[in-house]
Amino acid sequence: MSMTKSLFVPVLLASIAFAACDQSKAELEATKQQLQTVSLERDNLKAQLDASKQQTAALAQQINNVQAKLTAAMAALAAPPETGKGDKKSGAGGKTGSAKPSEPAKAPAP
């Protein structure tokens, strides 16, 4: 009987350890599943972030292009007109008309 009692204690301890192992194994599986879910969510968020960064870069390029066009348009409006540039040097004293551009033409007297 002594042999039976001496085997009973280790078997009892082994069964308790095995039961505890089963419980922790279930917890481990649940944690693995949660890790997989969180990793998938992280990967999706990274993909969204990369897409947002690309869109931001494209929009920044468009803004730069529009600003360059605006600057060119503003410079063209601010520059004096270049019409009649060659006429100033020809003729007597560079005047081409009888009336000054700032004065209206006078009507003939009756």
Image: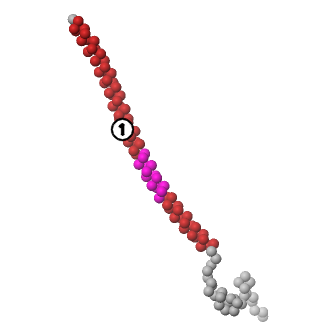
Q: Position of residue 24 (x, y in %)?
A: 34, 25
How many neighbours does mark 1 have within 10 angstroms: few (below 14), some (14-19), or many (20 or more)? Answer: few
11 up-or-down from 33: above or below: above
- Examine the structure image and report whether residue 52 is included in the region drawn in magenta: yes
Q: Which of 90 and 81 lies nearest the eye of the viewer?
A: 90
Residue drawn 38% across the image and 35% down it = 34
Q: Position of residue 97 (x, y in %)?
A: 69, 89
Q: Main secondary structure of the magenta part?
A: helix
Q: Secondary structure at mark 1?
A: helix
- Range shown magenta: 45-58
Tell me where residue 42 sits by quadrant: top left
Residue drawn 28% across the image and 12% down it = 9
Q: Position of residue 94 (x, y in %)?
A: 68, 88
Q: Is residue 49 visible?
A: yes
Residue drawn 65% across the image and 90% down it = 90
Residue drawn 48% across the image and 55% down it = 56
Tell me where residue 32 sits by quadrant: top left
106 up-or-down from 39: above or below: below
Q: Tell me which amino acid carries mark 1.
A: Gln
Q: Position of residue 88 (x, y in %)?
A: 66, 87
Q: Which of 88 and 62 lies nearest the eye of the viewer?
A: 88
Residue furthest to the bottom: 110
